[in-house]
Image (tube, coloured by chain):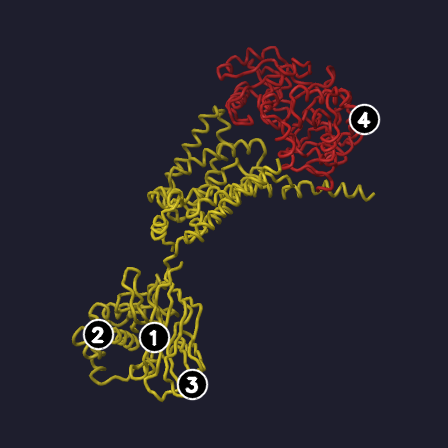
Amino acid sequence: MKRLSSWIVGLLFLIPTGLLVYKSQVLNLSLIPQKVDDVWNFYISVRPKDPAATSVAFPIPRAGDGLKISEERIRGKGFDTLIDRNSDSAMLTWLSKEPMTKRVSYTARIDIKPVIVRKIDKDTTTVYPRQIKKYLKQPVLAPEEEAAMKLLEGAIFEGGEDKSLIARKAFYYVHEEIQRNVKFKTIVDALSSGKGSPLIKARIYAYLLRRKDVPARIVAMLRLPLITDAPTEKHQITFASEVFLNNRWIAVDTNRGHFGERPDRYLVLHHHFEEVEKTLAKSKVAYTIRADRAVMNKFNKEEYRKDVLRKGSFFAFISLYRLPLPVQNIFNMILLIPLGALVLCLARNIVGIPTFGMFTPILLTMFFKETSLSFGLFFFLSVVAIGCVERYVLDKLYLLAVPRMSIILTLVILLLMIIAFTGLAEFFGASHIGYFPIVIVTAFIERFSIMLTEDGMVNTMKTLLGTLVISVLSYSLYSVSTLEIVMFTNPEMLLYVIGLLVLIGKYKGYRLSEFIRFRDLIAQVKKKGAV
Amino acid sequence: MREFGILGINNRIGRYILRQNKRANYPLVDDKVKTASRADAWGVPMPENYFTITNFGDLKKLPQLVAGMSSFVIKPANGSQGNGIVVVSEVLKDEKGWITFRRSSGKIMNMEEVRHHISGILSGMYSLSGLPDTAIIQQKINMHPVFNDYCYGGIPDVRVIVHSGFPVMSMVRLPTKDSDGKANLHQGAIGAGINLKDGTTRNAVIKNQVVETHPDTGHRLNGLVIPHWQEVLELAARCYDMVELGYLGVDIVLTPDQGPILLELNARPGLAIQIANQAGLVPRLEKITKEGPQGLTAKERVALSQSWF
């Protein structure tokens, strides 16, 4: 008997392991689809134009606000390197004893997340800290430029706007009234023609704001290609803006029309272009920038599907990816059920947590997953309240059991209506409520009210708590999106689950709760033994 | 816990219940109507079943059926842990001439309440599986006078764990105010372990806590001698032959006139008996498994058990 179950468990673990190894090693399939997140292999190479120069400096991306940088590598044999990081930007300097003749380079892997500020409140700040004051500094302008700016200022602002509104009005003007055109490179040209290069647009925006005492700066950055774009060989530095509102820098792009938002393919090299303008001048430095999408990380199921089908093996046949999408979505969810059952078995048979029925916690977890945790808990507790109504009100009416249950069911429908009318579901972040709650309720409410009658409030509440704890535990397991995708991609892993379940089923040791239950008994027996 | 030989739930189920109790025989113990007919055939005394109710339609006839009875017990045929049992100690008539019932707890129930309770049983509210059930109207058993000072409300019963026909451990369950007069340990009844050799109680517990005296009557709980002890054990041992379940809980009540009679059988007896006896079940069960000889009569098995435990 013991041998038989060891064999079975052994097979249940060996088979899926073998399949996984075969898939990954022989078929060369990855075990989960690739993520199509915006992770980039980033590369800069630099050479000073002056052949006698012994140093060269270039801005590099700095980790922070939406940027994650890893695997940084600096190349340049025989050079000293120095990274100067101030609060926003970083400059990398290569130093040499001899004149630099070769290119030096910097590589890194960069993960870019979009930076979005949804709500920009009114800002009436008048005094700024010292490190911000430099962003208020007026540029030295030629008299005709000064005159043009003044005219523009008068045309855009009415006076009395708060700083957030100033930033917005200036944004609308520069974004909409000045067309992007790289040929127009001075303030006067841009304002008279209604066309301007990205840099001049960023300049006009920053200068306009500074005139109204709003800190603003020009951002030097790269616009990386979309996944659908053809890969770009070399990237040019382009420009956007940032404005300091409510004590934080807000990304603005008057060229592409983003206010309070920096999409995840905009890679900032330096946040204060004016400071490095001279260093980056074309006469000073030659540079090449490359950025390739490092295909790794959201899961690209479509690609994976093609990949699996192309391999054309047995796995193409048993892969869930070949099913129609709606069916896929169902499996995505229900493949997690066995994992919930595993948690349930651990909780009940190894820990000894009491639950209502065997599968109520799992149904409840599915419900949480389908709606949201907070809504699920709210709904469940409302149902508990209805259960109490049954116990304390309907009991007095001496109704036959089936009609009574049907009344409860009808009350649940009414509850659903109330939820729909009051918008409670949206309030708790639930997208939709299906037929599911009714299923759970029928599974649960009857047991609940009987238990309330027979075992009393305390035991019932213990069981209720146990049920909730297990549901929330499995919910947190279900929320791991990687787990979902791993199960979906490799459904043979269900055999592992069965193997583990056999092991739990064979467990004859004590439940953790029994150590508490028999605690006094042990103490007594020990005491007697000592006498 | 292992060194003290305490039996845990997983072990009970995996090693004893699943291995030794044939599923096919469960109805014999779960369904009290079947238990009763089997007991009748084997000559095992049980409380008399006056009648059973299976259909809702029969509820109309209830007044005629109970007419002339002075006391009775309503039970679900497939109930567990004493749930759904109502003990009517007196049938009364109120000033208008309607029949009312006094429960053992003193509460008065009218006919409608009794009907409602029985219809609850029929719908399966108290049954193990939740399926529709039968209600049994049964003879109310009187308490043996020896327990007068040890009980509050209801009637005590003696639980014997029988392994392969050998009694291995026993306790008496004494109702308290907390347990609402029910001999149910979960609800706060007293469990007092019994020395198999002579039938005297030794340790008593309420919900895991050791107690010396009955909380309601103040009587000392140690040293109570269960009357007809040999008969109790032999009755328990014979139940094994009757239902052929290797791991069995036998509940026996002592009546003043009939002696020990079988109340009900349990295929999944609880583990609290270990607390009541301050001893683990495992060594005793193992001894029976390893050394218990086959083919003995109930009497011989009892004698062997008594010499061992």
Q: Quadrant of residue A8?
A: top right
**Mark 3 or mark 1, whichever is nearer to me:** 3
Q: Which residue is mark 4?
A: B198
Separation (CA) of disc 3 from disc 2: 36 Å
Tell which subunit mark 4 falls on.
B
Separation (CA) of disc 3 from disc 4: 101 Å
**Mark 4 or mark 1, whichever is nearer to me:** 4
Separation (CA) of disc 1 from disc 2: 26 Å
Q: Are marks 3 and 4 on the same chain?
A: no
Secondary structure type for disc 2? loop
Label 4 with label 1: CB-CB less than 8 Å: no
Secondary structure type for disc 1? loop
Tag 3: amino acid:
Ser
Tag 4: amino acid:
Asp
Instruction: Write down which chain is painted red.
Output: B
**Mark 2 or mark 4, whichever is nearer to me:** 2
Tell which subunit mark 1 falls on.
A
Chain A is shown in which shade? yellow
Q: Which residue is mark 1?
A: A215
Separation (CA) of disc 3 from disc 1: 37 Å
Query: Which residue corresponds to the image point at 63% horizontal and 39% vertical from the top-left?
Result: A508
